Image (tube, rainbow, N blue to C red):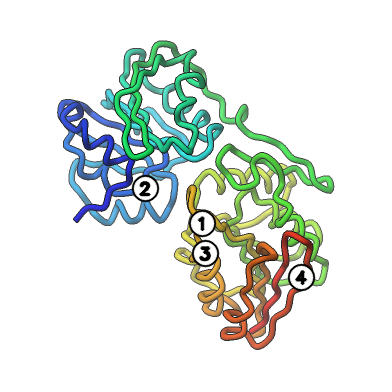
């Protein structure tokens, strides 16, 4: 049985509309629905690496799946209809949609679906220069709107980067990436524990903007950094941050440890506590539990979390010793050794 998100259920109610369409899917897709919608042809661009791998495994004929940060002419070739899943962040939606509609021709039909709590109702106002959008349907706190592209747009990726300066470091961030609006105070606390004592191979899990790796390389220039993230936009930010500061690191698209095949002296992380709009503690627990496979003997795990969350029990099971290295009213940094 196919489990569908509320947004996909809303599109399903209008599935007959798409039987004669060549559809391009993009945005915050959270299920396998694009594989099953009856169309003339389907192309899907998905931003999370684990979702991309899962859809590719289905190996459905005549459906092309991409994991690209930006749209290309090849990706949208022969498509005449867009279905876009609105994310939780308005600036992320605008960034992605500006890129998408810059490649499509005038009069291309676009459908936008999203949860009311994500701000999707502001789409007509945000996109009014390029698309006139009208409501098609709404149910279960989701809304489906549609319209036709009316004006062309020139998309420039550099225009969407936000630049933060921290201790002479240039941090570059794109909409939708953690730490876009400001450098997260939890990350700053973790970075404040870095010193020139850190050597060897370091893995930065969920690297986001690349802030932690850039900070560590400033205090420990001889450390060898590997940065991983599940989100292709985050990887682009990390690359831009390192490049802007003339720093080096290996950047890998990976769902936590899924693409990691070596061991490290140190693993650092500011793990996400949310998956989309919902709290999710599975990620931080998986980082802790699986770290033992990717740390050298006497290797260290160092991560930051909210002060109110307690991981002492889990750390005690896995590590020889651990401690709270630094703490504020809001955050604390755990340090654990094998």
Res 273 → quadrant? bottom right
Q: Where 86 sits versus 133, above or below?
A: below
Label 4 SS:
loop
Question: Label 3 near label 1: C-beta < 8 Å?
Answer: yes
- The first of marks 2 and 1 along the sequence is 2
Check disc 1 and report the residue beneath it: 279
Residue 198 bears which disc, if any? Answer: 4
As drawn, is 266 to the left or to the right of 129? right
3 or 2: tag closer to the N-terminus: 2
Q: Are marks 3 and 4 in contact (CB under 8 Å)?
A: no
The residue under the point 50% across, 49% down is: 231
Q: Position of residue 314 (x, y in %)?
A: 57, 79
As drawn, 82 above or below 66: above
Q: CA distance from mark 4 to mark 1?
A: 32 Å
In the rendered structure, which disc, 3 or 4, sits on the residue that comes first in sequence?
A: 4
Helix, strand or loop under label 2: loop
Instruction: Using the image, tell me which numbered label, if any, was put on residue 281.
Output: 3
**Residue 261: x percent and y percent?**
49, 70
Q: Of tags 2 and 4, which is closer to the observer?
A: 2
């Amino acid at each position: 049985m196919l489990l569908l998100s509320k947004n996909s259920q809303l599109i399903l109610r209008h599935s007959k509309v798409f039987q004669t369409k060549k559809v391009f899917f993009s945005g915050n897709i959270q299920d396998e629905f694009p594989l099953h919608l009856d169309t003339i042809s389907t192309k899907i661009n998905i931003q999370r690496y684990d979702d991309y791998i899962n859809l590719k495994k289905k190996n459905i004929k005549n459906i092309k799946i991409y994991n690209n940060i930006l749209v290309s002419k090849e990706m949208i070739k022969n498509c005449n209809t867009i279905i876009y899943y609105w994310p939780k962040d308005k600036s992320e939606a605008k960034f992605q949609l500006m890129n998408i509609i810059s490649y499509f021709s005038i009069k291309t039909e676009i459908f936008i679906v999203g949860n009311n709590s994500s701000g999707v109702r502001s789409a007509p106002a945000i996109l009014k220069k390029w698309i006139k959008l009208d409501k098609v349907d709404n149910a279960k706190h989701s809304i489906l709107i549609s319209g036709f592209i009316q004006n062309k747009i020139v998309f420039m990726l550099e225009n969407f980067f936000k630049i933060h300066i921290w201790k002479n470091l240039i941090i570059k961030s794109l909409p939708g990436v953690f730490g876009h609006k400001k450098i997260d105070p939890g990350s700053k606390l973790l970075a404040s524990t870095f010193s020139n004592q850190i050597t060897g191979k370091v893995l930065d899990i969920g690297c986001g903007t690349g802030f932690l790796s850039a900070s560590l390389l400033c205090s420990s220039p001889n450390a060898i950094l590997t940065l991983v993230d599940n989100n292709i936009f985050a990887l682009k930010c990390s690359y831009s941050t390192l490049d802007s500061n003339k720093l080096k690191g290996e950047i890998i698209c990976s769902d936590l440890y899924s693409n990691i095949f070596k061991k490290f002296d140190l693993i650092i992380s500011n793990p996400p506590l949310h998956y989309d709009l919902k709290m999710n503690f599975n990620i931080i627990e998986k980082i802790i539990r699986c770290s033992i496979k990717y740390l050298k003997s006497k290797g260290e795990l160092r991560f930051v979390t909210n002060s109110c969350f307690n991981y002492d029990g889990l750390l005690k099971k896995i590590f020889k010793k651990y401690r709270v290295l630094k703490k504020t009213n809001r955050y604390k940094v755990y340090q654990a050794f094998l």
